[in-house]
Amino acid sequence: QVQLVESGGGLVQVGESLRLSCAASGSRRVTITAMSWYRQAPGKQRELVAGVAGSHTTKYLDSVQGRFTISRDNAKNAVYLQMNDLTPEDTAVYYCNAHTPWGDIWGQGTQVTVSS
C-alpha cells in the first residue's frame, strides 16, 4: 500500500509564504509519472494548482503563476509547493496527487488559511 503524506499547511497573513511537502510512503516501490497539487475551497470544485511531469515539465493555474513554484525529488518520490505572496483567495485544502500507470493516489489534504 502506497500513501502520500502531506505537511506544511497552516495559518498565515496576506503576503506571507508557505511551503507544502508531500512524499510517497509504503511497503512497495511505485512508478510515479507526474505529481501535482490541487486545492478545494469551501463551496468550490477541486482545481489543479500546479503539476510536474518528469523532473522539469511544469504547469500552473493562471492565478498562481509567478507566485507558486512546484518542484519534485524523484529519488524520494516527493513533491513540494513553494507559495509566496499568499492572498485570501488561496485559502483552501491542498491535496497532493501522484499519477501512476495504475491510477491516481491522493493525499489526505492540508489546510492553508490566509488571513487578511
Image: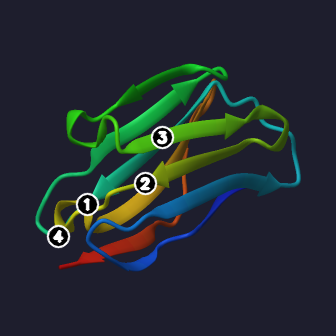
Q: Secondary structure at mark 1?
A: helix
Q: Position of residue 50 (x, y in %)?
A: 41, 37
User: For mark 1, does the 10 Å Cα neighbourhood hold few (<14), some (14 to 19), or many (20 or more) residues?
Assistant: many
**Type of colouring:** rainbow
Residue tagged by mark 4?
A: 42
The quarter of the displayed image where residue 14 is located: bottom left
Which residue ends up furthest to the left in the rendered image?
Answer: 43
Question: Nearer the N terminus, badge 4 or badge 2?
Answer: 4
Q: Nearer the viewer, mark 3 or mark 4?
A: 3
Question: Nearer the N terminus, badge 3 or badge 2?
Answer: 3
Q: Amino acid at mark 3?
A: Thr
Q: Position of residue 113 (x, y in %)?
A: 31, 76
Question: Nearer the N terminus, badge 3 or badge 1?
Answer: 3
Q: How far apart are the alpha carbons under marks 3 and 4? A: 24 Å
Residue tagged by mark 1?
A: 90
Question: Nearer the N terminus, badge 1 or badge 4?
Answer: 4
Q: Amino acid at mark 1?
A: Asp
Residue tagged by mark 2?
A: 83
Q: Are the two marked residues, 3 and 2, in contact with CB atoms closer than 8 angstroms?
A: no
Left or right, 91 with respect to 50, comes to left
Question: Nearer the N terminus, badge 3 or badge 4?
Answer: 4
Q: Amino acid at mark 4?
A: Pro
Question: Between residues 104 and 84, which one lies in front from this camera angle?
Answer: 84
